[in-house]
Image (spheres, rainbow, N blue to C red):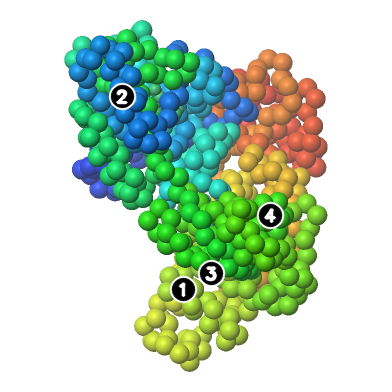
């Protein structure tokens, strides 16, 4: 035990140091495999000796059950906002005012990119991350510690030199490539697209389930000391610049683009550079923050309202342009949605030429009063495809035309439907070639079955030649038939067939995602397979059962249940099964770690008198059990308190063992005898 404790401590220190090199310094010195080995060893020790588990262990990024809500926290010092400068004159005025206020003293300035994300306050005690909160109204924010712990560039424990207590502030953001990936997935599953990385990022850290936050791969730039009085900052830290250097030395991720400036010319040079260069960053920046470096001068200058006198945000110009809307085109999406897009007279916005922009739906086009032939304002955010903000009414001639959705699908001619509660018009024909083309592209894509070699053009050709008429058709493709196709060589045909063969063994969540069930992206697919172990179990689940899974709402549950009711879908699944496609995952392991409730799954419902819900759950987990939120065939025990509802009914129907509070207390006292494992 003593030895294990020592080794665990050693491993934690070593892994933390590697994390810091990898995530903060971007300078890793070990291979992924070596790193995984260290982490595995630590996990092994912690499973064997659960008492050695510490909250700052690198194995504990994602832990715990979804939260019911966020608690409020009072910031020890207000989180400020910034005054804005929109041009050089505003900036000069600010600097002159500031100089006058400090009797023309000389001072350094620090220029930083203004990250367009979400401000957070992080608290460390004895070098360990203990609390993270949103800005909220500046005085009171929300405790989102569990979600922030999943962000790998936020250190869970600091390096040597950290004080007893420290608060820092920074901006958490969703990297643009992550944002695009999310939207590609949403497009593939027929969800409305997210508008921009900022809002999506803000939504991602406010998820009740930390697993969802973890899957988003967010990052942080730390830009300031937070809090006040009790922060023990070394004496050498005289200015903001030195503060950032010190923060970096104890493990925080500080933006390498920060620059110390002496003159306004240097500030303007920094700004001019980043007006253009920001397009190459993997995050969005909406301006430059200019700060007086000296902490003493910052103090002397003080704050007016919520804005410090010692800093200003010099905003980048908005990336907008005005151009002609030539026509409105339509794409038929994978779920049959008719997606309108603007065809524009080419125009340069923020360095790139734009010819297409997205328009959401007919309702939105009418609400904004956008007409074909209008001059329109378009805007580009972090997304690839810009969107149309609205018409320039002053330039209207009267020759512009209203847009209406066609009554028939432009691809297959089927009558278009528009459900009352939806904004989109849809083609209801599931064998519409446009829909099947999108589905096939999605099925073979990297995040789905990953059939490399079968690109967009080949999908189109296979459909046009009648070689593939449903998803299962891929698995009956013959080499001879492929070789008949124009420009298909032996090498490519072999590669495609080999990849089709290996796609049969993809894990269950991948297949679920690949099927293209409306609203089932990778996150929902993962949630489903945490509760169910096969496609058949999911297909057999009722809408109500599905909706009990935390993270799956009624709309998603309805869509999943509906998918498995459609005859064509059932038949495709049977054909995929017959072709040998994997539709299961390993059953949950039983008693793997020797703990008495290991391998047992519990659901706690109703109000218990002797425990809070979370106490009950953590006792179960300490004994090795798993706690889930919905009762399924895989649930071993349902612990029932006062006024239990539908979960009790489900348990009775499934014949699950039901424990009242007394029986549960007995089981906790003597788990080995009671659980009989
Ligand atoms: S300093 C005076 N530095 O901008 C202290 N803020 O409008 C204020 N922001 O809520 C913060 N990048 O979320 C500072 N490098 C940076 C920043 C930055 C982004 C955000 C921050 C703040 C808002 C102020």
Residue at image position (53%, 69%) is 441
Query: In this rendering, which labeled residue sits more in front, label 4 or label 3?
Result: 4
- Give the mark nearest the N terminus, 4 or 1: 4
How many angstroms separate mark 4 from mark 1 (CA)?
A: 39 Å
The answer to the question of whether label 4 and label 3 lie on touching residues, with beta carbons closer than 8 A, is no
N-terminal of the pair, mark 4 or mark 3, is 4
- Residue 17 location (% of width, % of height): 26, 32
Q: Earlier in the sequence, mark 1 or mark 2?
A: 2
Q: Residue at x 32, y 49 (%)?
A: 276
Mark 1 or mark 3: which comes first in sequence? 3
Asked if the residues shown at circle 4 and circle 1 are in contact, with their CB atoms under 8 angstroms apart, the answer is no
Compared with 198, 616 (above or below) is above
Q: CA distance from mark 1 to mark 2?
A: 56 Å
Mark 4 element type: loop
Q: Which residue is mark 2?
A: 95
Q: CA distance from mark 4 to mark 3?
A: 34 Å
In which quadrant of this rendering is ligand 1 seen? top left
Identify the mark at residue 441; answer none if there is no mark: 3
The local crowd at label 1, few if under 14, some if 14 to 19, many if 20 or more residues have their Cα within 10 Å, is few
Helix, strand or loop for disc 2: helix
Ligand 1 has an atom within 8 Å of the beta carbon of the residue at disc 1: no
Q: Residue at 57% of width from left, 19% of height from top? A: 72
Q: CA distance from mark 1 to mark 3?
A: 7 Å
Q: Which mark is residue 369?
A: 4
Q: Nearer the viewer, residue 417 or 55?
A: 417
Q: CA distance from mark 2 to mark 4?
A: 43 Å
Quarter residue 660 falls in: top right
In this rendering, is residue 559 above or below 455? above
**Does residue 225 lie above or below 265 as drawn?**
above
Which residue is more in the foreground, 597 or 340?
340
> At which x and y percent is residue 32?
29, 48
């Amino acid at each position: 035990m003593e030895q294990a404790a020592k080794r665990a401590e050693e491993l934690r220190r070593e892994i933390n140091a590697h994390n810091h090199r990898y995530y903060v310094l971007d300078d890793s010195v070990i291979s992924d495999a070596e790193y995984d080995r260290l982490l595995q060893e630590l996990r092994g020790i912690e499973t064997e000796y659960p008492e050695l588990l510490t909250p700052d262990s690198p194995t504990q990024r994602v832990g715990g059950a979804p939260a019911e809500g966020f608690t409020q926290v009072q910031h020890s010092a207000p989180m400020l906002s910034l005054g804005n400068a929109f041009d050089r004159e505003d900036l000069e005025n600010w600097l002159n005012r500031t100089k006058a206020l400090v009797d023309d003293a000389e001072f350094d300035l620090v220029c930083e990119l203004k990250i367009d994300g979400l401000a957070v306050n992080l608290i460390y005690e004895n070098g360990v991350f203990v609390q993270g909160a949103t800005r909220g109204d500046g005085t009171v924010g929300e405790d989102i510690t569990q979600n922030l712990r999943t962000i790998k560039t936020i250190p869970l424990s600091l390096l040597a030199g950290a004080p007893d207590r420290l608060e820092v502030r920074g901006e958490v953001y969703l990297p643009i490539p992550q944002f695009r990936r999310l939207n590609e997935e949403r497009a593939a599953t027929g969800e409305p697209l997210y508008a921009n990385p900022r809002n999506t990022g803000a939504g991602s850290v406010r998820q009740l389930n930390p697993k969802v936050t973890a899957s988003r791969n967010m990052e942080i730039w730390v830009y300031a000391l937070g809090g006040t009085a009790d922060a023990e900052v070394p004496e050498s830290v005289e200015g903001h610049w030195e503060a950032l250097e010190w923060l970096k030395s104890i493990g925080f991720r500080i933006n390498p683009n920060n620059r110390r400036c002496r003159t306004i010319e240097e500030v303007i040079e920094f700004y001019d550079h980043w007006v253009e260069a920001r397009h190459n960053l993997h995050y969005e920046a909406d301006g430059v923050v200019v700060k007086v470096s000296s902490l003493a001068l910052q103090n002397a200058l003080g704050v007016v309202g919520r804005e410090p006198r010692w800093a200003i945000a010099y905003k980048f110009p908005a990336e907008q342009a005005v151009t002609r809307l030539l026509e409105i085109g339509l794409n038929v999406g994978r779920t049959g949605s008719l997606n309108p897009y603007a065809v524009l007279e080419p125009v340069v916005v923020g360095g790139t030429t734009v010819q297409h922009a997205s328009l959401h739906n007919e309702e939105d086009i009418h609400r904004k009063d956008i007409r074909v032939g209008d001059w329109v304002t378009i805007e580009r955010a972090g997304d690839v495809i810009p969107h149309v903000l609205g018409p320039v009414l002053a330039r209207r001639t009267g020759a512009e035309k209203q847009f209406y959705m066609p009554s028939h699908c432009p691809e297959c001619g089927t009558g278009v439907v528009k459900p009352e509660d939806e904004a989109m018009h849809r083609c209801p024909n599931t064998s519409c070639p446009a829909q099947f083309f999108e589905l096939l592209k999605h099925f073979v894509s990297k995040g789905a079955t990953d059939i490399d070699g079968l690109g967009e053009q080949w999908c189109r050709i296979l459909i046009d030649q009648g070689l593939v008429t449903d998803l299962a058709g891929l698995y009956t493709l013959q080499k001879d038939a492929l070789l008949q196709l124009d420009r298909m060589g032996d090498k490519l045909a072999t590669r495609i067939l080999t990849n089709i063969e290996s796609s049969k063994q993809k894990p269950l969540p991948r297949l679920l995602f690949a099927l293209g069930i409306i609203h089932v992206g990778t996150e929902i697919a993962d949630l489903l397979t945490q509760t169910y172990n096969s496609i058949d179990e999911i297909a057999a689940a009722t809408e109500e059962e599905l909706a009990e899974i935390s993270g799956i709402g009624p709309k998603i549950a309805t869509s999943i249940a509906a998918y498995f009711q459609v005859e064509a879908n059932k038949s495709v699944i049977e054909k995929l099964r017959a072709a040998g496609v994997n539709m299961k995952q390993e059953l949950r392991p039983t008693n793997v770690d020797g703990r008495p409730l290991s391998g047992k799954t519990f659901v706690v419902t109703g109000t218990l008198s002797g425990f809070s819900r979370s106490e009950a759950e953590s006792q179960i987990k300490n004994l090795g059990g798993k706690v889930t939120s919905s009762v399924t065939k895989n649930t071993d025990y349902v612990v029932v308190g006062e006024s239990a509802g539908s979960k009790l009914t489900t348990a009775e129907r499934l014949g699950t063992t039901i424990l009242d509070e007394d029986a549960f207390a007995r089981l906790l006292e003597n788990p080995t005898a009671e659980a009989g494992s």
